[in-house]
């Protein structure tokens, strides 16, 4: 069978979404054409907030698997679909739930703060979930004398420690895309574009974070890029965000920061890029793959996710 043209696929996706009362949500890191067809795009916090309040019957989560799990946990009465169930997350994989649970058990009396990039089973041994959009404020809102375990992103944990003066005990995990940005290559780009401001995600290593004019989540970097007077930006996060930056500020120039030479030379997450228009169409048409979370795990994992949403609402985030 001949594959449909992109225009036909997009029309079919929109038709199916309407017919099935499905909402299509996409993360900023997926392919631009998938972002363009979505009803809603955002970072993990915004996607979770949106999932929690949608009245759609079906949620199609265009992103990596933990994002689908979060939506499924928040919306047990809805069908949650992901276009590619093999789209995993290196950061979530760097924190196997059984090992994390043993780490937590070995450090009694700690409040466990987990980054959203974790599996449902890891969230099940967590007290409060955070995203890069609210990690600082949520950690600051915890009583100053509370010892904290933070996992799995060590770079983000170090950054939050440096901002808050806390001494959180860190799990040694990382995102393979953010961990490979290169100080030397960013400096070389900066000398070619001296007026460019450097935007850095806090999952990057400390020396890269130190080069930043602005450190923040995708949502925060996007907001800064739109509002700031600079017209050129070097962007050190997964390059999918450049699509929305360029759309929101078409007159500005966004330059993806290069990774170091030891890698494929790529600043894309290969898992996010597994989500294509064709797979989105098939998943809506066939209503699969469906994301399911073990009921016992979901009963435990919903508590720290709800706590994050409640604290974010209270903190005005
Ligand atoms: O919070 C998220 O969605 C991630 C993984 C990054 C970001 O800053 O948006």
Image (cartoon, rainbow, N blue to C red):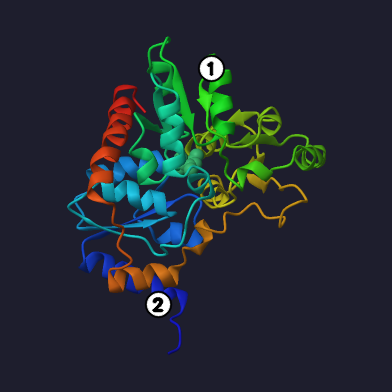
- Nearer to us of marks 1 and 2 is 1
Q: Quadrant of residue 53?
A: top left
Tell me the residue that label 2 is attached to: 8
Q: Is residue 91 above or below residue 132?
A: below
> Horizontal placement of 34 versus 73: left or right?
right
Q: Is residue 14 above or below residue 115?
A: below
From the viewer's side, name the closer residue of 92 and 104.
104
Which residue lies at the image location 46% right of the left edge and 79% below the top edge? 5
The tally of labels here is 2
Tell me the residue that label 1 is attached to: 167
From the viewer's side, name the closer residue of 103 and 36.
103
Position of the N terminus by quadrant: bottom left
Position of the C terminus by quadrant: top left
Mark 1 secondary-structure assignment:
loop
**Label 1 beta carbon within 8 A of ligand 1:** no
From the viewer's side, name the closer residue of 242 and 172.
172
Which class describes the residues within 10 Å of circle 2: few (<14), some (14-19), or many (20+)? few
Give coordinates of residue 113: x percent, y percent. 41, 28
Of mark 1 and mark 2, the one earlier in the sequence is 2
Give coordinates of residue 236: x percent, y percent. 64, 41
One can see residue 288 in this view: yes
| Residue extending farthest top | 145
């Amino acid at each position: 069978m001949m594959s449909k043209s992109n225009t036909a696929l997009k029309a079919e996706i929109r038709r199916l979404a309407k017919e099935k009362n499905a909402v299509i949500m996409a993360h900023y890191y997926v392919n631009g054409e998938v972002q363009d067809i979505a009803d809603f795009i955002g970072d993990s916090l915004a996607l979770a907030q949106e999932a929690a309040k949608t009245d759609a019957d079906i949620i199609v989560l265009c992103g990596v698997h933990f994002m689908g799990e979060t939506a499924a946990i928040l919306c047990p009465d809805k069908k949650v679909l992901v276009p590619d169930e093999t789209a995993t997350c290196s950061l979530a994989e760097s924190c196997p739930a059984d090992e994390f649970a043993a780490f937590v058990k070995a450090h009694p009396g700690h409040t466990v703060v987990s980054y959203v990039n974790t599996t449902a089973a890891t969230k099940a041994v967590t007290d409060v979930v955070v995203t890069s959009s609210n990690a600082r404020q949520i950690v600051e809102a915890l009583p100053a004398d509370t010892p904290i375990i933070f996992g799995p992103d060590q770079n983000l944990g170090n950054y939050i420690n440096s901002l808050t003066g806390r001494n959180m005990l860190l799990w040694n995990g990382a995102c393979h895309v953010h961990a490979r940005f290169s100080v030397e290559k960013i400096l070389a780009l900066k000398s070619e574009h001296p007026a460019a401001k450097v935007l850095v995600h806090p999952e990057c290593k400390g020396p890269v974070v130190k080069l930043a004019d602005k450190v923040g989540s995708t949502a925060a970097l996007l907001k800064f890029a739109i509002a700031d007077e600079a017209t050129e930006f070097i962007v050190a996060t997964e390059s999918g965000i450049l699509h929305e930056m360029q759309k929101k500020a078409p007159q500005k120039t966004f330059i993806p920061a290069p990774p170091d030479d030891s890698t494929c030379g790529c600043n894309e997450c290969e898992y996010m890029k597994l989500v294509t228009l064709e797979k989105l169409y098939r998943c809506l048409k066939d209503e699969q793959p469906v994301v399911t979370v073990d009921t016992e795990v979901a009963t435990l994992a919903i508590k720290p996710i709800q706590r994050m949403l409640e604290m974010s609402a209270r903190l005005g985030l």
